[in-house]
């Protein structure tokens, strides 16, 4: 069994409904649930942060979880 973390980021400039936090979460969750050897342990969401760097609060939390 593989423990997985879901990370979702939406730029503050994105207005596309298909890229919404809810839609991204739905797609990723469906994919992971279709894999019998994968289990979702944590979700991390950075809404309104740029992807130009990794100075995002939830990304940093995820990094800490993965690499304690």
Image: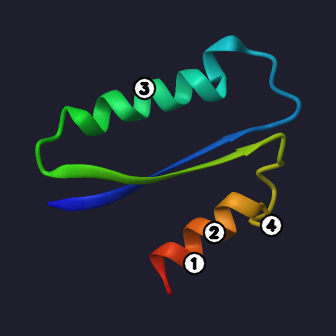
Q: Answer with the quarter of the image where residue 12 lies.
A: top right
The residue sitting at 46% across, 75% down in the picture is: 66
Could you say whether the residue bearing mark 3 is in a helix, strand or loop? helix
Comes first in the chain, label 1 or label 4: 4
21 to the left or right of 24: right
Q: CA distance from mark 1 to mark 3?
A: 25 Å
Residue 33 picture location, percent across and down: 24, 35
The residue sitting at 80% across, 67% down in the picture is: 55
Q: Would you place residue 63 above or below residue 56 in this image?
A: below
Find disc 4 in the rendering and name its residue.
Answer: 55
Comes first in the chain, label 4 or label 2: 4
Find disc 1 in the rendering and name its residue.
Answer: 64
Comes first in the chain, label 4 or label 3: 3
Q: CA distance from mark 3 to mark 2?
A: 22 Å
Disc 2 vs disc 1: Cβ atoms closer than 8 Å? yes
Q: How is the image coloured?
A: rainbow
Residue 45 picture location, percent across and down: 65, 46
Residue 61, labelled with which disc? 2
């Amino acid at each position: 069994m593989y423990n997985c973390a879901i990370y979702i980021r939406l730029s503050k400039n994105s207005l596309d409904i298909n890229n919404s936090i809810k839609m991204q979460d739905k797609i990723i969750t469906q994919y992971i649930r279709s894999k019998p050897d994968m289990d979702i342990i944590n979700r991390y969401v950075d809404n309104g942060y740029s992807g130009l760097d990794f100075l995002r609060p939830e990304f940093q939390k995820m990094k800490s979880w993965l690499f304690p």
